[in-house]
Amino acid sequence: MPPPIDTPTVSELARQSQVMRSIGTPFVADLLAAVDRQLDHAPRTARLIRSWGSGAASSAIAMRINAALHALARQRRVPLLSALYAGEHRRFDDAVAQALAGHDDVLVEWLHQVPQTNEVGRAAGFHAALMVLARRYGHPFELFEIGASAGLNLNLARYAYDLGGVHAGLPGSPVRIAPAWHGSPPPIAPVVVQAAQGVDLNPIDIRDPAACERLASFIFADQPDRSERLDRALGIARAHPPQVATGRAADWLAARLAMPAPEGRHRVVLHSMVLQYVGADERAAIECTLAATAKQADAARPFACIGFEWNATRTQVELRLRSWPDGEDRILAHCHPYGGWFDWKPL
């Protein structure tokens, strides 16, 4: 992952175009570069993006507009854009200019909505970290996910994994997650999920076709394997609906973790690519709840937090494990933002 470009002459769209090229999504890279060049065809969209200032990166502005254009293409509302996505031509600037000029209001609406990818590829990181904990303590897990979106990662025990040659999860699952794996494999240990629940400010209703279409629009157009995996994960979710509440993460987590922990169960808080959207006050409240819960942890009632998030400088994505009562806090791996690869660190 290249370092962020700090010069003010480089826009966030141009910066993200370079990032997309570096992680192997050339179509999205070319699309975002064209948006950067043609942005003034959509005056309201241009003003909104430029007013974001230093928060544009953490708010994933480029991913919002990329998803909006993907949605327009999927809905065939801009024929030249749909033809671009179908590979019928390479006239990125013409297609993007037409879409921007004709759908300024649609783009502004998308920009005001927080991205919802709910990428199940990240479940590989969660499962690997849970294997570390399972080998250490051996208890079944109770999972609490903040920013759960549609709750697809709450079904992580129903997916099959190949983690550096270690086969884990549910054999024969229609969702198979096999990221490129660098470094040693994770420890082999059975992961038993006894309960799982999550929260989101605006959960995705997996029974709503429009909501599922929105999820699909956030998948990069040149990554059809991710689209297929999303469809299969949604199928599992319809058969095994995740439990996702609507609410503020800090309040929900404090209420859930205030309940006494049962003996012999391992409580784990999960979060992936969500903290960048959470304000400083709420993040502090979440940390306060984690600290209070950690003080109550013991070998019979261990507690952990697994994060899959950008580092402070947004140069790397880190799979971070914090565990109690042992007090461990370590980076288990550096990762592709969508779980395409993991660079596992020695334990």
Image: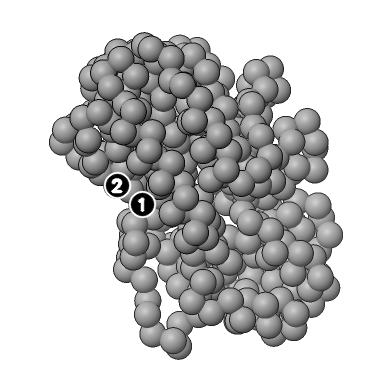
- In the picture of the structure, the residue carrying the numbered disc 2 is 334
Within the image, what quadrant is residue 174 found in? Answer: top right
Q: Residue at x 44, y 86 (%)?
A: 8
Q: How is the image coloured?
A: one colour
The amino acid marked with disc number 2 is His
Q: Position of residue 344 (x, y in %)?
A: 24, 38
Task: Assess whether mark 1 and mark 2 are in contact (beta carbons under 8 angstroms).
Answer: yes
- The dot on residue 4 is none
- In the rendered structure, the answer to whether residue 244 lies left or right of residue 292 reads right
Q: Is residue 238 above or below residue 84?
A: above
Indicate the position of residue 216 as horizontal and vertical percent values. Answer: 67, 44
Give the residue drawn at x 46%, y 53%. 283
Neighbour class for label 1 at 10 Å: few (<14), some, many (≥20)? many
Label 2, label 1: how far apart the Cα atoms are: 6 Å
Q: Which residue is situated farthest in the bottom direction here?
A: 9
The C terminus sits in image quarter: top left
x, y percentage for residue 32?
A: 57, 69
Q: Is residue 35 above or below residue 27?
A: below
Q: Is residue 248 left or right of residue 124?
A: right
From this view, report whether residue 332 is shown above or below residue 164: below
Relative to residue 255, is residue 165 depicted above or below? above
The residue at which mark 1 appears reads as: 317
Point out the residue furthest to the left here: 346
Residue 128 appears in the rendering: no
Asked whether residue 254 is in view, the answer is yes
**Residue 232 lies in what quarter of the image?**
top right
Camera-side residue of 289 and 175: 289
The residue at 33%/48% (across/down) is: 318
- Of the image marks 2 and 1, the number of the one nearer the N terminus: 1
Relative image position of residue 279 (x, y in whole percent): 52, 60
**What's the residue type where badge 1 is placed?**
Val
Badge 2 crowding class, 10 Å Cα cut-off, few under 14, some 14 to 19, many 20 or more, is: many
